Amino acid sequence: MAAPYLLLLALALLLPLLLLGGWKRWRRGRAARHVVVVVLGDVGCSPRMQYHALSLAKCGFSVTILGFCNSKPRDELLQNDRIQIVGLTEFKSLTVGPRVLQYGVKVVLQAVYLLWKLTWREPADYIFLQNPPGLPAIAVCWAVGRLCGSELVIDWHNYGYSIMGLVHGPSHPLVLLAKWYEKLCGRLSRVNLCVTNAMREDLAENWHIRAVTLYDRPASFFKETPLDLQHELFLKLARTHSAFRACSEHLDPGMERSAFTERDPRSGAVTHLRGRPALLISSTSWTEDEDFSILLAALEKFDQLTLGGEDLPALVCVITGKGPLKEYYSRLIGQKHLQRVQVCTPWLEAEDYPLLLGSADLGVCLHKSSSGLDLPMKVVDMFGCCLPVCAVNFGCLHELVKHGENGLVFEDSEELAAQLQMLFSKFPDPVGKLSQFRKTLRESEQLRWDESWQRTVLPLVMDT
């Protein structure tokens, strides 16, 4: 007897959605072209999706970004009249009951909430979705697309199940369920983009998903920083971080100095200080998948070499980013008592990060892919600034870092320490290996994001 009432209840819930979907399909045919970009993560920490939004806006689309607003996106995004950012609420897991139940409740709540947010937006031609995280977003975005006439585009940055496997183990029921879900729902999209050829091949062979490789490319604002802007940035950072302050022996009321640069009071010209430290930068999300013990051990070895009389400079190591393990590693760094190496961990404004990359002497990347199929965007940005890189090795890194050509690849702290010793020997040597890498990057005529996007993605979204 209850069955008819349940059927009526289901129809009562579905009918408004069906009517709304029909109305939105009609509206979409009459409205300006519109795209919704969905990020179930922090928009400010999702540069690739920000670049998608900017590229779509430049091509005449109006863009709505749905995502978490934990940090500030780039000013170009905030100041663009064609782009609107709509903040999403992130639901926390329950603190009681079995873990599967906690996770299940969170997924259901997030699904219903995302469905509501998407359904009541302006009609969209396309929904661009970042994956991971794709649970529950892939199914929800596909359902809304079928209802409202929107085509789904999934941008595969990695696999969500492989990231979950780092925490729970690859054979955990939640991980296996997430893998099944990703494989099933990933086939529902009209267009699939991915970040490497290795991932494209894996999607085709093991997931039966046809994808197009869109390599991460540096945006136009990632470039070498002029000395005068370097000087201003160093002075700004010196207010809160002693590593950027001029040594007391260099203090002169008539000169404006940082630890690296000085400005002539008469001409205003900025030059590097003689005997300045080398500036090394590593960008991270401070999570367990990046092994900072490798970097710390290498810095400790480098410190011992400088104290032992090796012809090496003092070193300032800047580790940027924020995340759950930042305080833990900051304490660990403090316990090392390094003498010729200074480590600081600032959280930079979005506009200052490219300036710092463009001012550094060397980048270090500790990214290890959970799937072995994605590439670190931080290295892409460093290369855009013509900054040579030492990167920890993994599966498809060769698609980006060419060992001995534009940087070096290492396996452990001993190898990284040896590379630092070699690269900074007689620093700043204009004919040394570090300078050769930078020269190679300058001459490489790297393809920028806008040009790559227009070649690869624009044809896929302009045929409807």
Image (cartoon, rainbow, N blue to C red):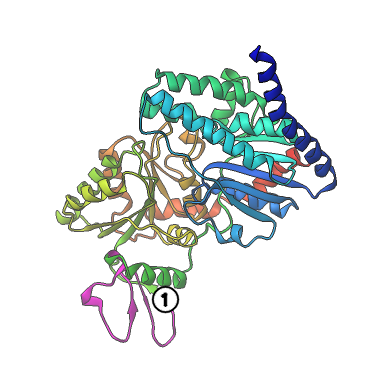
Q: Position of residue 43 (x, y in %)?
A: 53, 49
138 relative position to 336: left or right: right
Q: Position of residue 283 (x, y in %)?
A: 40, 49
Residue located 33% across and 69% down the image: 238
Q: Is residue 265 magenta?
A: yes
The picture quadrant where one finds residue 292 is top left
Q: Position of residue 142 (x, y in %)?
A: 67, 30
Q: Position of residue 62 (x, y in %)?
A: 72, 52
State which quarter of the image contains the N terminus: top right
Q: Judge whether residue 321 can be spotted in this image.
A: yes
State which quarter of the image contains the C terminus: top right
Looking at the picture, tell me which residue is in the foreground, 277 or 98. Answer: 98
Amino acid at pointer 1:
Val
Residue located 80% across and 50% down the image: 32
Looking at the picture, tell me which residue is in the foreground, 215 or 239. Answer: 239
Q: Secondary structure of the magenta portion, mostly?
A: loop
Residue range in magenta is: 243-269
Of helix, strand and loop, which one carries label 1?
A: strand
Looking at the picture, tell me which residue is in the foreground, 71 or 89. Answer: 89
Vertical side of 178 occupied by 293: above or below: below
Residue located 37% across and 46% down the image: 323
Looking at the picture, tell me which residue is in the foreground, 276 or 332. Answer: 332
Vertical side of 402 occupied by 173: above or below: above
Q: Is residue 166 magenta?
A: no
Residue hosting label 1 = 270
